[in-house]
């Protein structure tokens, strides 16, 4: 019994830590996005709250917390309440299988824990994809239950878009799965250790560079970000599926969007860019004679990779206008899907012959 | 018939640009260069204000002469000139001076004013002026219905240097500033 209790305590600690990190990252992102967008558009971004506006996320959070919670007349109250939760939980739950640092175990008494991953399940990436699909329900139900035409249109668009692009996300990572021979993110990351040409973007025999491009584009579409932000196109649909939401429920949707961004960036970093591996074998801290603190450098590398993906999101948002709906669908089905499929075929053949020759 | 070689090469270039997202990359380079050479064009408005141009047309005001008397002679020309019918003048004789008039009441409905400056142009005695005030946001629209005292107060705080009253204009001649040969001209 005590062992179970200890395990539970450790797990809850890990969950709390990861959730805190994600929430803090999201707070940071809301500010960083406005700042980066502002700088790219020759503005300053938020400057009022705190020095250079660095306390803006907290001001926003407090404001959202105290806003009136409005349920529109004729809304399906149960689903209206459920939708933000249904959007947020899958976004946060995916972080359970993300390896943040080296795959090392810690012996505590009679059992071992892995400090840098909440749960090393052997179908990690499948688990993330499955829950990402559930996240789409939050958006669709939120749009439907609001009893508003803008919300409904946003929800419908989201449904079509998420289905189209989730397919591409799933297919684009199949190449990596073929090369790694595993669905566990821990093993996929471990297989990319060593020099940076072992990362699956560059790896022999089948560099997954096209898969990475397809993945990033589809991930942008799946998280409903510019230029694929049709579900919340503010110039057409007010705010899309969360038009009728206010206060904390709106904050939940907002949080879910950014948590999804972080999640897809983490997955991209772990699958294509070697996760927590440095671009060189081992770690600098390890070479300096402090192998016990090597995890600091590994974690930093993971953060750098993730944040560069997140910066790419902002960068795209500052640059590109929104796609038209038929362009979005055509691009998804007639461009991204064939590339992803061709990538699978090429990767499979290359890996097969590579293994035959060995 | 095969297309000429140049066209084929152009098509190839177009195709290559399409598959490498060339146009998007150009756009992203542009945004990144703005980020790296960050020079904001905006001002932190309440804390720093831009310098207004010399001919800025701001809040309207009624002016006074240096002895504190109102310039306005109640001629109603500003009311006639105003395209938005902002101004309403109630003109009256100066008590005891039947040749001289003044504006007994003077109202401006600044909710409608479009700051064209035609009333200032129309005024024969330069009794109206446009100040450089522009921060006139109010919570109650009725605060923008200004009466004579308020307009004079705006003029007092915006025009500290007042025009000298012409001697011959006082006490009982109400000349406009039109040119008469036999009376002194206004100093330039």
Image (spheres, helix red, strand yellow):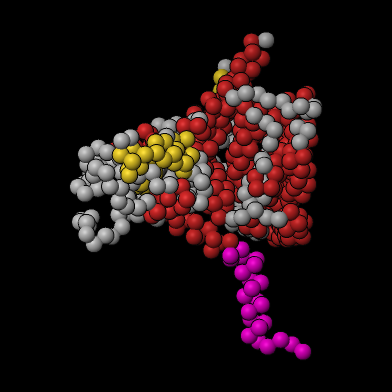
Query: Which residues, given as a range, are shown in magenta?
Result: B1-23
Q: Residue at x 28, y 60 (%)?
A: B179
Where on the picture, by quarter, is residue A255?
A: top right
- Residue A321 is left or right of residue B30, and the answer is right
The x and y percentages for residue A9 are 60, 16
Left/right placement of residue A100 relative to residue B162 reads: right
- Residue A40 appears in view: no
Answer above or below: position of A9 versus B108. Answer: above
Let me know if residue B113 is in the magenta part.
Answer: no
Q: Quadrant of the N terminus of chain A?
A: top right
Residue A234: percent from the left, percent from the top?
65, 45
Left/right of residue B114 with respect to residue B163 in the rendered view: right
Pinpoint residue B62: horizontal percent, then vertical percent.
Answer: 35, 42
Residue at 65% x, 76% y is: B12
A91 lies above or below A2: below
Which is more toward the observer, B67 or A228?
A: B67
- Which image quadrant for residue A72? top right
Q: Nearer the viewer, residue B33 or B150?
A: B150
Residue B3 inside the magenta-drawn segment:
yes
Q: Pick whichever, A168 or A75, lies toward us.
A: A75
The reply, left or right, for residue A309 in relation to residue A44 is: right
Residue in view at x 69 percent, y 36 percent:
A243
Looking at the figure, which quarter contains the C terminus of chain A?
A: bottom right
The location of residue B77, given as percent across then percent down, is 42, 50
Q: Residue at x 47, y 35 (%)?
A: B145
- The secondary structure that dominates the magenta segment is helix
């Amino acid at each position: 019994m005590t062992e179970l209790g200890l395990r539970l305590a450790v797990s809850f600690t890990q969950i709390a830590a990861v959730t805190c990190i994600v929430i803090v990252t999201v707070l940071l992102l809301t500010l960083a996005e406005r700042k980066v967008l502002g700088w790219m558009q020759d503005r300053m971004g938020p400057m009022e709250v705190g020095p250079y506006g660095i306390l803006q996320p907290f001001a926003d959070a407090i404001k959202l917390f105290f806003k009136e919670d409005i349920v529109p007349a004729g809304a399906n109250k149960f689903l209206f309440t459920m939708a933000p939760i249904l959007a947020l939980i899958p976004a946060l739950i995916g972080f359970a299988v993300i390896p943040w640092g080296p795959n090392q175990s810690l012996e505590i008494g009679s059992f071992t824990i892995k400090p840098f991953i909440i749960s090393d399940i052997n179908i990690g990436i499948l688990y993330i994809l499955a829950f990402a699909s559930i996240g789409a329900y939050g958006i669709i139900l939120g749009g439907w239950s609001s009893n508003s035409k803008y919300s409904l249109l946003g929800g419908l668009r989201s449904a079509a878009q998420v289905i189209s692009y989730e397919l591409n996300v799933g297919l684009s990572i199949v190449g990596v799965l073929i090369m790694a021979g595993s669905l566990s993110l821990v093993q996929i990351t471990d297989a990319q250790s060593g020099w940076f040409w072992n990362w699956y973007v560059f790896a022999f025999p089948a560099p997954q560079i096209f898969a990475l491009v397809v993945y990033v584009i589809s991930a942008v579409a799946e998280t409903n970000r510019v230029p694929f932000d049709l579900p919340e196109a503010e110039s057409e649909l007010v705010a899309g599926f969360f038009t009728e939401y206010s206060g904390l429920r709106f904050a939940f949707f907002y949080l879910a969007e950014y948590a999804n961004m972080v999640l897809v960036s983490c997955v991209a970093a772990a699958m294509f860019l070697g996760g927590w591996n440095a671009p060189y074998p081992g770690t600098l801290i390890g070479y300096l004679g402090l192998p016990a603190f090597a995890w600091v450098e590994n974690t930093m590398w993971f953060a750098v990779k993730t944040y560069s993906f997140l910066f790419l999101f902002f960068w795209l948002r500052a640059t590109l206008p929104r796609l038209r709906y038929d362009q979005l669908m055509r691009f998804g089905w007639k461009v991204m899907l064939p590339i992803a499929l061709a990538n699978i075929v090429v990767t499979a053949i290359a890996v097969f012959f590579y293994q035959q020759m060995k | 018939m095969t297309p000429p070689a140049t066209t084929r090469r152009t098509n190839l270039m177009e195709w290559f640009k399409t598959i490498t997202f060339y146009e998007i990359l150009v756009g992203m380079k542009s945004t990144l260069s703005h980020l790296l050479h960050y020079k904001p064009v905006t001002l932190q408005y309440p804390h720093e204000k831009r310098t207004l141009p010399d001919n800025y047309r701001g809040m309207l005001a009624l002016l006074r002469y240096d002895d504190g008397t109102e310039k306005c002679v109640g001629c109603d020309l500003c009311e006639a000139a105003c395209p938005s019918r902002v101004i309403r003048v109630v003109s009256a004789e100066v008590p005891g001076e039947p040749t001289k008039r003044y504006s007994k009441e003077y109202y401006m409905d600044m909710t409608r004013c479009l700051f064209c400056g035609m009333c200032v142009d129309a005024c024969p005695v330069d009794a109206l002026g446009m100040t450089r005030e522009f921060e006139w946001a109010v919570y109650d629209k009725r605060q923008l219905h200004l009466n004579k005292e308020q307009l004079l107060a705006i003029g007092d705080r915006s025009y500290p240097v007042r025009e000298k009253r012409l001697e011959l204009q006082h006490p009982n001649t109400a000349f406009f500033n039109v040119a008469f040969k036999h009376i002194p001209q206004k100093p330039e």
